[in-house]
Image (cartoon, grey):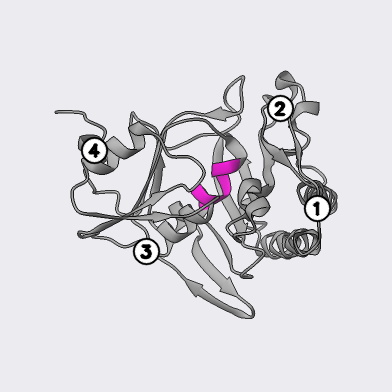
Amino acid sequence: MTLPVHLDAAIREDVIALAHDAASAILGIYDSEFAVQHKDDDSPLTAADLAAHRCIVDGLARITPEIPVLSEESAHEVPTATRRQWQRLWLVDPLDGTREFVKRNGEFTVNIALIVDGVAVWGVVQAPVTGELWHGGVNIGAFRRQGSGETAIRVRAPATAPLRVAASRSHRDTRTQAFIDRMGETEPVGLGSSLKFCKLAEGTLDVYPRFGPTSEWDTAAGQCVLEGAGGAVLDPQGRPFRYNQRERILNGDFIGLGDVALPWREWMGERD
């Protein structure tokens, strides 16, 4: 029997190798004097973003030529009507956390996720500086890979106080702070990029609240890893995040949870 593409182990390994290649391209620029440009939305852009983009897009075209790619660095070239017709697609952030890259704090990643009928089914997150890599999906499990070693990972459940809550270094607002204040005893942890999802997945963080815009390529791969480890990424109505379903590729508010039994609705300020 031929397995669906999102369960094909050979393809998964090829994409993992591609994430490594993209990380190498990023590090080649990270260790140099690079220039920083800015896009129309004022977000930073470097040669590393573009080098990783080319590496991944070209590689995916070789590995799965039948599956289109939506990358942050070329999404503006794809008409909405075209991508909305895609049943399957690769959703890619070649360098998630460009602000962290520019700060040289190491907290940036390569994100690649496979979307099928709006569902993020498998993804890989590569941390170039540490060499760590996480991959997984809801029906596959979640794994942390370092060098030649690989370990299955699970969320911390039940999660007990103090709850370790991810608080972005680059994005912090009053709604997030109010949410954290309602959680009781907490241990805020500053961390950039999709690393937050991976730390939730391996049980070193418990909650990641995000109020404010992100793009679909920022969350898809991390969601795959987190769901594979037993966690969830939910919108304020408690629905799992879905992708390529809207006219815009911006996400709404969300909560990333390790232990899905945590009373997150109360922390939102809701009452039964």
Mark 4 / mark 1, whichever is N-terminal: 1
Residue where numbered disc 2 is placed? 83
Image quadrant where residue 216 sits: top right
* In contact (CB < 8 Å): disc 3 and disc 2: no
User: Residue 223 in magenta?
Assistant: yes
Mark 3 / mark 2, whichever is N-terminal: 2
Residue where numbered disc 1 is placed? 34
User: Which of labels 3 and 1 is toward the front?
Assistant: 1
Which residue is rendered at x = 66% and y = 33% of the image?
A: 87
> Magenta segment, which residues?
218-224
Mark 3 / mark 1, whichever is N-terminal: 1
Cα distance between the residues tagged 2 and 1: 33 Å
Residue where numbered disc 3 is placed? 203
Secondary structure at badge 4 equals helix
Secondary structure at badge 3 equals loop
Mark 2 / mark 1, whichever is N-terminal: 1
User: Which of labels 2 and 1 is toward the front?
Assistant: 1
Q: Amino acid at mark 1?
A: Phe
Cα distance between the residues tagged 3 and 4: 20 Å
Which residue is rendered at x = 18% and y = 48% of the image?
A: 184
Cα distance between the residues tagged 3 and 1: 35 Å
Q: Nearer the viewer, residue 98 or 124?
A: 98
Task: Categorize mark 1 by other alpha carbons within 10 Å: few (<14), some (14-19), many (20+).
Answer: few
Q: Amino acid at mark 3?
A: Gly
Secondary structure at badge 1 equals loop
Residue where numbered disc 4 is placed? 267
Task: Categorize mark 2 by other alpha carbons within 10 Å: few (<14), some (14-19), many (20+).
Answer: some
**On screen, residue 127 above or below 75:** below
User: Which of labels 2 and 4 is toward the front?
Assistant: 4
Cα distance between the residues tagged 4 and 1: 42 Å
